Image (spheres, rainbow, N blue to C red):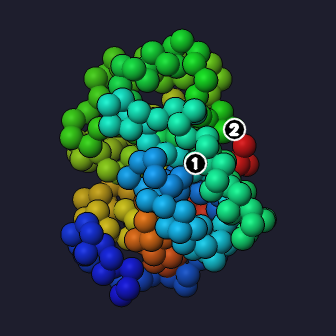
Amino acid sequence: MGWLSRWFRQDGATSPRPVELAPLDLSAFHFDFHSHLVPGVDDGAPDLDAAMEMIDGLVGLGYLGAVTTPHIMAGTYPNDRNTLEPAFAKLREAVFNKHPQFQLALGAEYFLDASLLEKVANGEDLLAPGGRLLFELAFGAPPEDGLLREFLFEVQVRGLQPVMAHIERYPYWHGELHRFGDFAEQGVWLQVNAASIVGAYGPEVQQAAETSIERGWVSLLGTDAHGMRHIDALAASRTHAMVHQLAKSAQNPTLF
Ligand SMILES: [Fe+2]
């Protein structure tokens, strides 16, 4: 399996489960809302060629467009609109020349910390196309309850839609998945990575993704594309029953 060998090479993945269904036409999802396509600004596409290869892949799989969401993380990726927009403009021009029908919007994947809470509370200009604010948590330790609660309150009170990135990748909550039911109930959109569903991050992450989708908590499928391995995993996910289920039940918002 070609796509899996990329994961073995780069991420030490485990084996996926056997295929289950006929490949789904991914055009059902219309847009991808989580990706790292802007060249040279984070750990995603290193250059324009790499970004275009991923976009070629998305076009080939039937996507109409994508919100690309570079990391914004104090200290590690100190990006903001000013640092991202010039690189994004070059990407958009290249995409327009090759795939004029493919729509591209600039968002961000914000790391949740006190500085993000402050930005939201101060009403700063955030990269949130369509009012959807994508945020991620640390992988190693859960966020302080108060910080997450206050952040969600400030986001929602400003009329923004909070979107929690790759919920299945927070191992400290694998034993308490009911938390995601609570978040969904509070109006938080929960996003799962296609690569998780096919086992690229191991069986526990895969199980958390499957259970969360099965219970109807997940609003968005995302590629979280940093490289072609994520596009390949997306293609492989087309046969998975949970991707078929999400195509019926996921939110299907416009791009902006
Ligand atoms: Fe991401």
Image quarter of residue 116: top left
How far apart are the two marked residues, 2 and 1, measured between alpha carbons? 21 Å
Judged left or right of residue 205, residue 21 is right
Residue at 45%, 75% (x, y): give it: 232
Q: Which residue is mark 2?
A: 130
Residue 171, how many percent across, how many down? 24, 47
Report whether 117 appears left or right of 62.
left
Q: Position of residue 88 (x, y in %)?
A: 61, 48
Residue 196: quarter of image: bottom left
Nearer to us in this view, 18 or 120: 120
> Disc 1 designates what residue?
87
Q: Position of residue 202 (x, y in %)?
A: 25, 65
- Residue 208 placement (x, y as % from top left): 33, 55
Amino acid type at mark 1: Ala
| Dots 2, 1 in contact, CB < 8 A | no
User: Within 10 angstroms of label 2, few (less than 14), some, or many (20 or more) residues?
Assistant: some
Residue 203 in view (yes/no)? no
Query: Residue at (41%, 83%) from the top-left corner?
Result: 19
Which numbered disc, 2 or 1, marks the residue that appears first in the sequence?
A: 1
Q: Nearer the viewer, residue 87 or 174?
A: 87
Depth-wise, is mark 2 or mark 1 nearer the camera? 1
Q: Quadrant of the N terminus?
A: bottom left
Circle 1 packing at 10 Å, graded few (<14), some (14-19), many (20+), is: some
Q: Secondary structure at mark 2?
A: helix
Residue 228 is left or right of residue 23, and the answer is left
Asked whether mark 2 and ligand 1 are closer than 8 Å, the reply comes as no
* Residue type highlighted by circle 2: Gly
Q: Residue at x 73, y 48 (%)?
A: 254
Q: Quadrant of the C terminus?
A: top right
